[in-house]
């Protein structure tokens, strides 16, 4: 979800060597929270993401309404990698 260059930048708050280290620490902390990060919650989000789809025409109309520079498109290939791109 983040660019490699941003992940490699120094942590703005100075508590971690890089933004990537901060992100990794937040992920570990989140997963250690057994009450807040449940398997059920994860599966519900996974199902919701699988069915959340906008076709090209819907994105075009949304871009006309709010401005294309305000829309980020996340494409995720499960268990592989993700891409983040701006709508042009």
Image: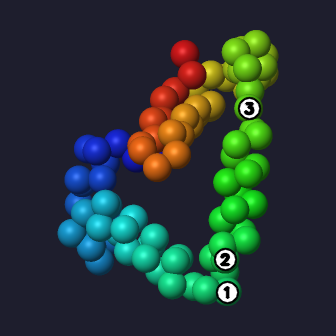
In the picture, the quarter occupied by the C terminus is top right
Please report the residue visible at 31 percent of the width from the left and 48 percent of the height from the top.
Answer: 6
Mark 3, other Cα within 10 Å: few <14 / some 14–19 / many ≥20: few
Mark identifier at residue 38: 2
The location of residue 49, given as percent across then percent down, is 69, 46
Where is 14 relative to 44, above or below?
A: below
Distance (Cα) linking label 1 and label 2: 6 Å
Q: Taking 19 as reference, is 4 above or below it? A: above
The disc label shown at residue 35, or none? 1
The label on residue 53 is: 3
Residue 21 located left or right of residue 23: left
Rendering coords of residue 76 (x, y %): 53, 40
Q: Residue furthest front?
A: 79
- Horizontally, residue 57 falls left or right of residue 18, namely right
User: Is residue 17 found left or right of 23 in the rendered image?
Assistant: left
Identify the element where label 3 is drawn: loop
């Amino acid at each position: 979800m983040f660019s490699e260059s941003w992940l490699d930048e120094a942590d703005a708050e100075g508590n971690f060597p890089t933004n990537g280290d901060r992100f990794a620490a937040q992920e570990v902390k989140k997963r250690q929270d057994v009450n807040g990060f449940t398997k059920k919650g994860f599966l519900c989000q996974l199902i919701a993401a699988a069915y959340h789809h906008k076709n090209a025409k819907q994105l075009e109309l949304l871009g006309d309404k709010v401005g294309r520079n305000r829309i980020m498109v996340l494409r995720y290939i499960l268990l592989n990698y993700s891409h983040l791109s701006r709508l042009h």
